[in-house]
Image (cartoon, coloured by chain):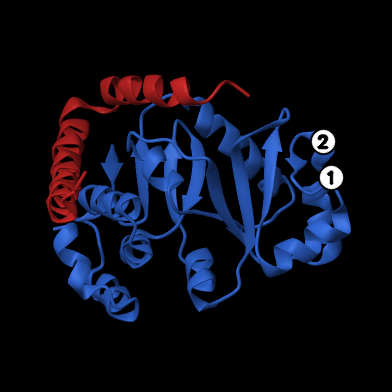
């Protein structure tokens, strides 16, 4: 099996740039939505990663 | 979220991670030890949706007796090295981790200020207020260029997130000065 590293590198860079674009959209959403609603969603995500101490 | 030059105010409930961090900074404050939270947790506090194993906190270099008070801390937090003298020797050279309830994640990675960047971070800390709870964090003018300097994909994503949050209040003279100092001008394309 021959792995095309150049193709994988391109894909890796594309994914990275895509995540950066997502961050722009996410911050826009964060600012537009307002703290109460946006951080309710955010806290739900963060709390799922960490138990209450 | 209200972002201004000297503070950001967020109207939200503290998450479990925020509570964990707030308990530790409460300990530092009760001992009158200055601190600044640095690195990835700052982005999470401000809303970035990712996790972290450790929360980096910078404090001034302490004497053995001062460090002992953190180490003992009424058994609220455990130090990953349970020998006091060895812990002190370790933090003098690198960093030391504290955790709760026999659970290593998340943990606080505590380190002494060791260089001019650390001193600047402590002196120019930025305030984030969450429902009357204060968190002092690394100043954005330095934090964003420093994240670019660290340079992993995760760090660059954090830098982009922080730039998006703070771009209207950055002191561009200072920001550009740190961009120059950290030699990361070529990485600006990732955040703008």
| Residue A53: image location, x then y, percent | 63, 24
Asked which secondary structure carries label 1, the reply is helix
Are the numbered discs 2 and 1 placed on the same chain, yes or no?
Answer: yes
**B28 or B154, nearer to the observer:** B154
Using the image, tell me which numbered label, if any, was put on residue B28. Answer: none
Horizontal side of residue B153 vs B59, given as left or right: left
Q: Residue B78 falls in which quadrant of the image? A: top right
Q: In this view, does B79 lie above or below B140?
A: above
Which class describes the residues within 10 Å of circle 2: few (<14), some (14-19), or many (20+)? few
**B160 or B138, nearer to the observer:** B160
Residue visible at 28% across and 51% down in the picture: B162
Horizontal side of residue B78 vs B57, given as left or right: right
Q: Which chain carries label 2?
A: B
Check contact, mark 2 vs mark 1: CB within 8 A: yes
Q: In this view, does B41 lie above or below A5?
A: above
Asked which secondary structure carries label 2, the reply is helix
Q: Residue B89 falls in which quadrant of the image? A: bottom right
Chain letter, blue: B
Q: Mark 1 lies on which chain?
A: B
Chain letter, red: A
Using the image, tell me which numbered label, if any, was put on residue B75. Answer: 2
Q: In which quarter of the image is the N terminus of chain B?
A: top left
**B110 or B122, nearer to the observer:** B110
Where is mark 1, residue-wise?
B72
Residue visible at 13% across and 58% down in the picture: B192
């Amino acid at each position: 099996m021959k792995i095309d590293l150049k193709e994988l590198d391109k894909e890796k860079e594309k994914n990275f740039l895509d995540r950066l674009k997502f961050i722009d959209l996410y911050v826009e959403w964060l600012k537009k939505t307002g703290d109460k609603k946006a951080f309710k969603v955010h806290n739900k995500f963060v709390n799922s990663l960490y138990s209450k101490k | 979220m209200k972002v201004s030059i000297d503070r950001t105010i967020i109207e939200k409930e503290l998450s479990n991670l925020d509570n964990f961090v707030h308990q530790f900074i409460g300990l530092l404050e009760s001992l009158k030890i200055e601190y600044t939270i640095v690195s990835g947790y700052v982005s999470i506090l401000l809303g970035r949706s990712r996790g972290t194993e450790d929360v980096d906190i910078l404090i001034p270099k302490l004497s053995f007796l001062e460090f002992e008070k953190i180490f003992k801390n009424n058994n609220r937090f455990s130090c990953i090295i349970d020998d006091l003298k060895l812990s002190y020797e370790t933090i003098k050279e690198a960093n030391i981790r504290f955790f709760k309830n026999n659970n290593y994640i998340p943990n606080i990675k505590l380190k002494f200020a060791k260089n001019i960047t650390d001193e600047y971070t402590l002196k120019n800390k930025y305030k984030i207020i969450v429902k009357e709870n204060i968190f002092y964090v690394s100043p954005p003018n330095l934090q964003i260029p420093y994240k670019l300097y660290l340079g992993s994909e995760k760090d660059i994503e954090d830098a982009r997130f922080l730039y998006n949050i703070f771009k209207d209040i950055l002191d561009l003279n200072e920001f550009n000065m740190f961009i120059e100092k950290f030699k990361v001008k070529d990485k600006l394309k990732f955040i703008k």
